[in-house]
Amino acid sequence: MNPDTLFSRVRIIGAGVDVLGDLLVRDGRIADFGPSLGKSDGATVIEADGAVLCPGLIDMRAALGEPGFEYRETIASAAAAAAAGGITTLAALPDTQPAIDDPALVHLLRTRGEETGSLTILPYGAVTRGCRGEELAEIGLLREAGAVAFTDGSRAIGSARMMRLALSYARGFGARIVQHPEDPSLAAGGCATESEQSTRLGLPGIPVAAEAMMVARDIRLAELTGGAVHFAHVSTGEALALIRVAKAAGLSVTCDTAPPYFDLNETSIGNFRTYAKLSPPLRKEHDRKLVVAALADGTIDAIASDHQPRDADDKRLPFALASAGGSGLATLLAVTLAHVHNGSLSLTAAIDLLTARPAALLGSEAGRIAKGAVADLCLFDPERIWKVEAGKLPGKAQNTPFDGRALEGVVLGTWKRGKRVFG
């Protein structure tokens, strides 16, 4: 049994809580918190004036690399990177080799997460067998095994008929379908947003409309079936406007975005900078600003890391041939805090987008500060400056689009069920 831990003189934020004071952890749970708890005999006292204590971050979209792509990332290396980034719960994408289309693999991922001692893994089940878009997977059996939602990961469900079937079946099990919103026929062969810049660089473009068209189609299918659809890494203002209207109409439509889409724009690909080659591609500044506005007004339900580990050889290729994807576990909190510092978001709203709101979407009891809640916690200094350097990040994957960026916000410690796992 771990000794009690008393966090003293910290700012405690999470799920409607915002108080300066103390928090006591006992037997892996939050025993009490408030303006002043006084001393606790035998407790390990952590004093961090000016620091923020919040629930462990909940990352609702990340690729782990395992099984099948261990050369890019393993569960162990991802868990280490997640702990360094303050993440204690992670929803893992199913487009691995083999794909997570078998209940045994769902069980395996959950177990492997527990074995790390620092990370709860919530597996997504594949919508279609092998994530190939041809035949529905066993959604009921995968749900029973513990799949939190269903997606084909970075592959869009291109067939309207298949998406309709998936929404209908998932509805029967109270589950969401998570879509990569990009029309495959318009995106095929493209590697950058279709624009003056892509033309100047000679890169095949993907029209912005490819995202909005898929969003519009799937909103209509959600209305038709009564199913729940979640759009991942939304990156355009046009798509967000459609989602905003769908929500106002009471449809079961939700969405997330990732830090590159509210912090970077298409100029980041520079002279064929492959670390900034992502899927969906980085957008124009106009769209970036609209994503920031949608975070502030509540249209976007969560911020996910969209962690896509890649090996150096995946990126050391001509831009059009390089693999899309960026690592994001270590930078998730700090890039979000950059938009707190510039006034785009309040700190409480930012923490909610990283904890309570994704927890609600995933059906997790984590992500909150409450008496009796599991003590998955993140302690960070919101003002301390650090520099992102590829090659020096925690974990195996180093392919960050934020390489060279100075950020404010350093994780001082991460606790899983009351046990310190980082810092």
Image: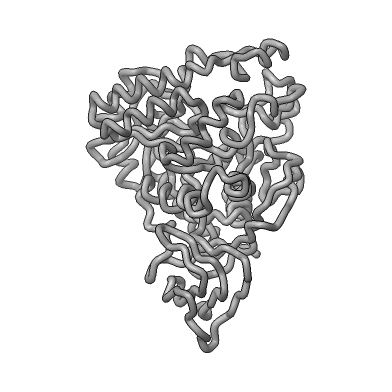
Q: Is residue 134 visible?
A: yes
State which quarter of the image contains the C terminus.
bottom right
- Nearest the camera: 170 or 17? 17
- Nearest the camera: 91 or 340? 340
Name the outermost residue toward the bottom: 41
- Name the spot of residue 195 as percent of width and height, x first: 62, 14
Question: Which residue does the image show at 76% across and 41% down from the upper left?
Answer: 404
- Nearest the camera: 51 or 157? 51
- Name the spot of residue 356 as percent of width and height, x first: 42, 53
Name the outermost residue toward the front: 343
Quarter of the image where one finds residue 325:
top right
Relative to 83, residue 229 above or below: above
Scheme of colours in the image: one colour
Relative to 367, residue 255 above or below: above
Q: Is residue 112 visible?
A: no
Question: Which residue does the image show at 61% across and 26% down from the upper left?
Answer: 285
- Name the spot of residue 82 as percent of width and height, x first: 58, 52
Question: Which residue does the image show at 54% across and 15% down from the upper left?
Answer: 207
- Name the spot of residue 163 as percent of width and height, x first: 33, 24
Question: Which residue does the image show at 37% across and 36% down from the upper left?
Answer: 254
- Nearest the camera: 32 or 163? 32
Number of labelled discs? 0
Instruction: Determine whether, in the image, residue 259 is placed left or right of residue 100.
Output: right
